[in-house]
Image: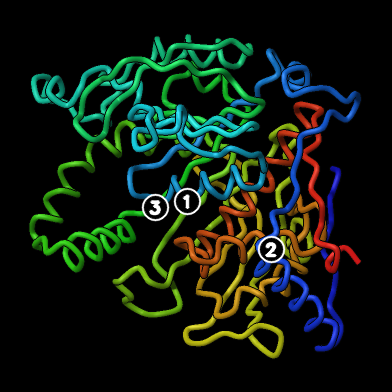
């Protein structure tokens, strides 16, 4: 199996300090990493480059997760890895003279929210008595037909679900870019839609962590009672378990967020154990690994090269089985104290799909203020973004050009 190994070993504090300083300067300067799409065979404009991929040249990526589980942050990480300019809501958004839209676009990526395919508006669901998680409340026939058109390189008139007032608004025109990302509750629920996806990912926040996060948001920040929060979660859980959770078994990658094992009875969800579950046998995808491919490893890296306060950090790696699939699992439990020192961890990982030494660390530093950037959620979302970029390049034959910071490249 082909292996991309960008790992290198750091010998001595002086070398470590120089590399960390170079990465810090690159991130602090906030000089955008120049990213462009380039055909590996010919130079062409964006439209002709697009036709070089599969079908109509569009690579279709599906991201599944419940609401409040980090999809928006992951979308920012993923679109940032692909680069592109003019990133923002389609048509500029309501606040900029456009319309209320859920679609985000750049010159390279389009992100479509699958809530737009709700069958009924909020009032209609009150009549049917079903939640939006129920498959019967989603128009999968239209979703399939329109995503098939986008993948063929054709424009569509997509409906809009207005989250502000719960209505179905006037459809908007979507012209596909090279990468189209569909995110929401059900990107893999319908077998026809699932077959269209080139790559799929599931953000799996376990019940204990969801509960801790919801308490933090709704009780601590909004003044809701514990009883009302419990009722809200319990009312939603049967439909979630029936219609959303089963997609985990179909995903190519699952990022699973669990309570930490490092602090007994930790209930606040502030320290997390996160698993990066990679399905074996996916074409054009080579699982990332720690130290020695195929081995089973536990690693506690805290020491002179990685600053760790209580409760520390622990990594693990090895083969496993997940929902009937053979998988490779990377695991991180704990929090980073200093993102600049993440280069030490990155140097022990292989098949990370980075284009230059330290790119994973640089991307983490760039989004250092985003949720999860000090733990495994941000770490593995960034790794997933790099792996999806690599997958896109292999599938489409289009190279995403990245200019490494001069000091790191040197």
The image quadrant where one finds the N terminus is top right
Q: Which residue is drawn at 56% across and 53% down?
A: 381
Query: Closer to us: mark 2 or mark 3?
Result: 2
Disc 2 designates what residue? 362
Neighbour tally class for label 3: few under 14, some 14-19, many 20 plus, Cα within 10 Å: many
Q: Are marks 1 and 2 in contact (CB under 8 Å)?
A: no
Q: Which colour scheme is used?
A: rainbow
Image quadrant of residue 304?
Answer: bottom right
Residue designated by label 3: 205
Which residue is at the front of the view, 407 or 386? 407
Please tell me which of labels 3 and 1 falls first in the chain: 1
Coordinates of residue 69 in the picture (x, y in percent): 38, 50
Mark 2 crowd level (few <14, some 14–19, many ≥20, 10 Å Cα): many
Residue at the spot 53% in from the left edge and 36% down from the top edge:
251
Circles 2 and 3: CB atoms closer than 8 Å: no
Q: How far apart are marks 1 and 2 (CA)?
A: 17 Å
Query: Would residue 259 be found to the left or right of residue 84 on screen?
Result: left
Q: How far apart are marks 3 and 1 (CA)?
A: 14 Å
Residue 373 horizontal/vertical position (percent): 52, 65
Left or right relative to 364: residue 168: left
In the image, residue 83 sits, relative to residue 49, either above or below, namely below
At 49% from the left and 11% from the top, the residue drawn is 156
Is residue 129 placed above or below 150 in the rendered structure? below
Q: How crowded is mark 1: few (under 14 residues within 10 Å), some or many (20 or more)?
A: some
Q: Element type at marker 1? A: helix
Determine the image quadrant of residue 410: bottom right
Spot occupied by residue 157 in the image (x, y as percentages of width and height): 44, 12
Q: How far apart are marks 2 and 3 (CA)?
A: 26 Å
Residue that numbered label 1 is attached to: 73
């Amino acid at each position: 199996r082909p292996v991309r190994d960008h790992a290198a070993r750091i010998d001595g504090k002086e070398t470590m300090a120089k590399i960390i300083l170079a990465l810090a300067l690159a991130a602090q300067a906030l000089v955008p990493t120049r990213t462009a799409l380039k055909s590996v065979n010919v130079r062409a404009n964006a439209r002709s480059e697009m036709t070089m991929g599969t079908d109509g040249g569009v690579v279709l990526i599906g991201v599944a997760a419940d609401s409040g589980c980090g999809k928006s942050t992951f979308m920012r990480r993923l679109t940032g890895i692909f680069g592109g300019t003019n990133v923002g809501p389609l048509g500029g958004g309501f606040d900029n003279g456009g319309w209320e839209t859920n679609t985000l676009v750049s010159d390279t990526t389009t992100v479509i929210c699958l809530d737009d395919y709700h069958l009924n508006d909020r009032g209609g669901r009150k009549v049917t008595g079903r939640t939006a998680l129920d498959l019967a409340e989603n128009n999968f026939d239209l979703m399939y037909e329109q995503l098939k058109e986008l993948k063929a390189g054709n424009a569509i008139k997509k409906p809009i679900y207005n989250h502000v007032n719960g209505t179905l608004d006037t459809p908007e025109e979507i012209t596909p870019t090279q990468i189209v990302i569909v995110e929401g509750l059900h990107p893999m629920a319908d077998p026809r839609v699932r077959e269209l996806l080139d790559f799929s990912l599931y953000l799996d926040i376990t019940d204990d962590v969801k509960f801790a996060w919801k308490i933090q948001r709704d009780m601590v920040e909004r003044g809701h009672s514990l009883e009302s929060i419990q009722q809200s979660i319990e009312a939603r859980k049967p439909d979630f378990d029936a219609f959303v959770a089963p997609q985990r078994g179909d995903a190519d990658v699952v990022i699973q967020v669990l309570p930490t094992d490092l602090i007994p009875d930790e209930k606040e969800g502030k320290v997390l154990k996160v698993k990066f579950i990679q399905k074996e046998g996916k074409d054009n995808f080579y699982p990332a690994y720690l130290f020695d491919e195929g081995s089973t490893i536990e690693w506690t890296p805290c020491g002179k090269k990685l600053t760790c306060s209580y409760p520390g950090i622990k990594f693990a790696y090895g083969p496993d089985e997940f929902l009937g699939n053979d998988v490779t699992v990377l695991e991180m439990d704990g929090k980073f104290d200093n993102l600049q020192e993440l280069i030490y961890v990155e140097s022990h990982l292989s098949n990370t799909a980075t284009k230059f030494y330290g790119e994973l660390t640089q991307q983490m530093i760039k989004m250092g203020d985003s949720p999860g950037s000090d733990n495994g959620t941000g770490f593995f979302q960034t790794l997933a973004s790099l792996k999806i970029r690599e997958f896109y390049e292999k599938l489409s034959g289009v190279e995403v050009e990245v200019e490494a910071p001069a000091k790191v490249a040197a």
